[in-house]
Amino acid sequence: MATVFIAVSTCKTRKRGAALRAAPRSLLLTMKPYQNIPITECGEPLVAIAAEIITIDPHPYISLGAPYGDRSPFFVRQGILERLQKSQTYLQTLCPNYQITIFDAYRPIPVQQFMVDYSFAQLAESKGLEINALSEAQKNSLIAEVIKFWAIPSHDPKTPPPHSTGAAIDVTFYRDHHKGVVPVNMGSPIDEISDRSLPNYFANSTNKQELEFHRDRQLLNQVMTHSGFVRHPNEWWHFSYGDQLWAWISKEKLAIYGGSK
Ligand SMILES: [Zn+2]
């Protein structure tokens, strides 16, 4: 598997288990609209992402201690890998010095739980809030922000988290550089809980660099949708094909990829 190396901070405090246990049940039962879509599982296997596709190493969630066990984040369904390869080939015709790079793909449900809890703790910390002294209103507000970006770690086969299906991928660009391949600045880091994550956040900027961020986000969307993927409405980096979110956005009646273990 082709890999590139990036520095990932692992010094952040881990405060696990706080988020979902702290959240009122009513908030957690809030269904996203796509979760009502029925799934007819097609049965394709999860496969390792092919060597010619760049994957970020060390993987950011593994670096944080996420519980993968013997699983790898760099697995997808067979059909997703084929679409990814088609997008990469198309990208080469448009922008030969760019490469699609996988930040994250398959996510076991315990990892989804870990990352939701971690994001909750990070968000509280970023707002200067002490996690053990939150009021109910503060907990609700934090959880509402977190679940805008992170799916609930549901074990219900009717509502799998998108990344647990092997059909959702978080991607960015790397580009050729005389020092090797380097990340393209897309205007905000993957997983940031803020409006900058919205795909068109920089669309109306008058700043030259911000317009480049927008152009690169559009290019990413163009090459991914070329092979059938759809983009998450709130996240410039998240794409999927065949899961419930894809069906909802594409106005399909059925999803074809359910939770995968
Ligand atoms: Zn994602």
Image: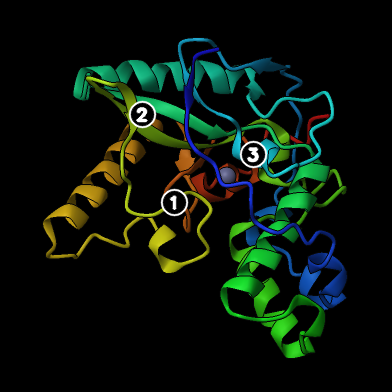
Quarter of the figure that contains the C terminus: top right
Amino acid type at circle 1 is Pro
Q: Is residue 1 above or below residue 116?
A: above
Q: Which residue is mark 3?
A: 243
Q: Which mark is residue 189?
A: 1
Label 2: which secondary element: helix
- Left or right relative to 93: residue 66: right
> Residue 138, relative to residue 167: is it above or below?
below
User: Which of the 4 quarters of the picture holds residue 26?
Assistant: bottom right
**As shown in the figure, which amino acid type bears the numbered disc 3?**
Asp
In percent of width and height, residue 128 lies at 61, 80
Query: CB of residue at label 3: within 8 Å of ligand 1?
Result: no
Q: Which residue is labeled 2 in the image?
A: 226
Q: Which quadrant of the rendered structure holds the N terminus?
A: top right
User: CB of residue at label 2: within 8 Å of ligand 1?
Assistant: no
Crowding around mark 1 (Cα neighbors within 10 Å: few <14, some 14 to 19, many 20+) is: few
